[in-house]
Amino acid sequence: MDFDLFVIGGGSAGVRCARISAGHGARVGIAEDRFWGGTCVNVGCVPKKLLVQAGEYGAWADDAAGFGWKIKKGPHNWRKLIKAKDKEIARLNGIYRRLLEGAHAQIFDARAVFLDPHTLDVGGQRITAERIVIATGGHPERVQIPGAELGIISDDAFFLPRMPERVAIIGSGYIAVEFAGIFQALGAQVDLIYRQPLPLRGFYQDLREGLAEALGQQGIAQHPGCRPLKLEADGDRRVLTFGENQKLRADLVFFATGRRPATEKLGLDNAGVTLNDKGAVVVDANLRTSAPHIYAMGDVTDRINLTPVATAEGHALADSLFGRHPRSISLQNVPSAVFSTPPIATVGLTEEQAAARGPVDVYVSKFTPMRHTLSGRTRRTMMKLVVDQRTQRVLGVHMLGEDAPEIMQGLAVAVVMGATKADFDRTIGIHPTAAEEFVTLRTRTRVSGVAQAAE
Ligand code: NDP
């Protein structure tokens, strides 16, 4: 065999797995045909966060007046922002390559396709490997309506030549609500069209209501309970028909309607790798596919599609295969954040999930953040603790409000360690912060799950 391990895909999961495996002494090859660093670095988390931050500066300039500043806010220069972002992303691409080179993994800027279970065609070269990892990620997906190709997907949003005046975003998942905030903050008029009654299906109810309210306060027009029907061109503009035949004219229509695992044209049939009905690679707890020497990880497996999960899986597999330290990662209590405006962060169970298992004490706090008592901006922060009534363990922590992702990371450690409400209560707060509210929630708001438990 040419390699002990060959990794297909140079994203978060693949690069980490290749790098650590090579560090353990394995002979490693890795192929990537698009961009090193994958979705997260190039058309995902990293550039998205930079755009969110660009929007925040605009809002701070507005808010500064309440603190005595006289700031005249000029127009935003989108091209300048994109150029700066591209420069930073190019720097990160380079780092990813250098990390692999430094670990002595052999890099292939090419597509890899299975010819048989141990053989790949890598850019025309025949390569054999003892073990193979599929870490090809996923692609954004448009809804199949007439004219769908006239709309953009998130990959395109990072390279727009100019800021559109009016944007219609379809969907209300992570990407939809994050970009709604970005475009609105950078000066566009945004319409959010989604089929649920509230945005962010799967998140807890109060938080979804809070976000819908916050989106409205920013001036984002929401069209809940609506499906897209067709998209037409009117010169450079687009006409979207949705819901009960309503029409909306916009400069840009953006499909933020989910992502599809990238399993096409990989020759997986030649390798005996089984896919599920959504086209994702099926894996067991040790990331093993239906072919025992082939593994898969990250978004291509469509379980928890988050970068830190992918990198943790890549590291764990490398340690297991070549580091004499077999281990798998837990997919319980994975914290996550939505970089909406304001952001959301969460770890553990929602009230609804926890209540289905037994009675829970629920603590909720809603308040105006200190900054906005002077800024005059209408904005509310919402925090929630979900506590198992029997064991008093904190099962879920949720927050909508400024700095929520930064606050949640530390709380996630406590939840992973099994902290109880009493542990939270005996922790001294840091004053004055929003975060201190999590350790001063004394009065129970309600009990949930009693009816379910009695059934
Ligand atoms: P999501 O699955 O989060 O949301 C998809 C949205 O599209 C939902 O609102 C869904 O509606 C809607 N939708 C799907 N199909 C249709 C249809 N046929 N007609 C109308 N609406 C439709 O996907 P995203 O694209 O936002 O993000 C993909 C994944 O990437 C996320 O789930 C997350 O794992 C990851 N991600 C994480 C981020 C983070 O950590 N901050 C940021 C961005 C992405 P409905 O709810 O009704 O199904």
Image (cartoon, helix red, strand yellow):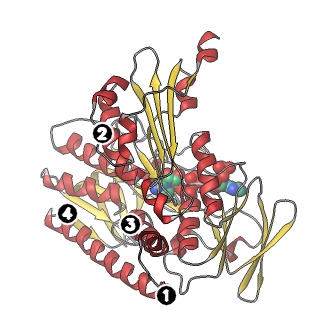
Image location (x, y in percent) of residue 199: 64, 52
Residue 429: image tag: 2
For the residues carrying marks 3 and 1, which lies nearer the camera in this image?
A: 1
Distance of label 4 from label 2 (alpha carbons): 47 Å
Image location (x, y in percent) of residue 357: 53, 20
Residue at the disc numbered 1? 74
Image location (x, y in percent) of residue 59: 48, 71
Residue at the disc numbered 3? 46
For the residues carrying marks 2 and 1, which lies nearer the camera in this image?
A: 2
Residue occupying the point 48% across, 58% down: 373
Distance of label 4 from label 3 (alpha carbons): 25 Å
Distance of label 2 from label 1 (alpha carbons): 39 Å
For the residues carrying marks 3 and 2, which lies nearer the camera in this image?
A: 2
Looking at the rendered image, the quarter that the N terminus falls into is bottom left
The amino acid marked with disc number 3 is Val
- CB-based contact (under 8 Å), mark 3 and mark 1: no
The secondary element bearing badge 2 is classed as: loop
Note whether 185 is above or below 77 in the view shown. Answer: above
Residue occupying the point 61% across, 73% down: 152
Query: Which image quadrant is residue 323 in?
Result: top left
Distance of label 3 from label 1 (alpha carbons): 26 Å
Please tell me which of labels 4 and 2 falls first in the chain: 4
Note whether 369 is above or below 395 in the view shown. Answer: below
The amino acid marked with disc number 1 is Gly
In the image, 225 versus 206, the foreground residue is 206
Residue 105: image tag: 4
For the residues carrying marks 4 and 2, which lies nearer the camera in this image?
A: 2
Please tell me which of labels 4 and 1 falls first in the chain: 1
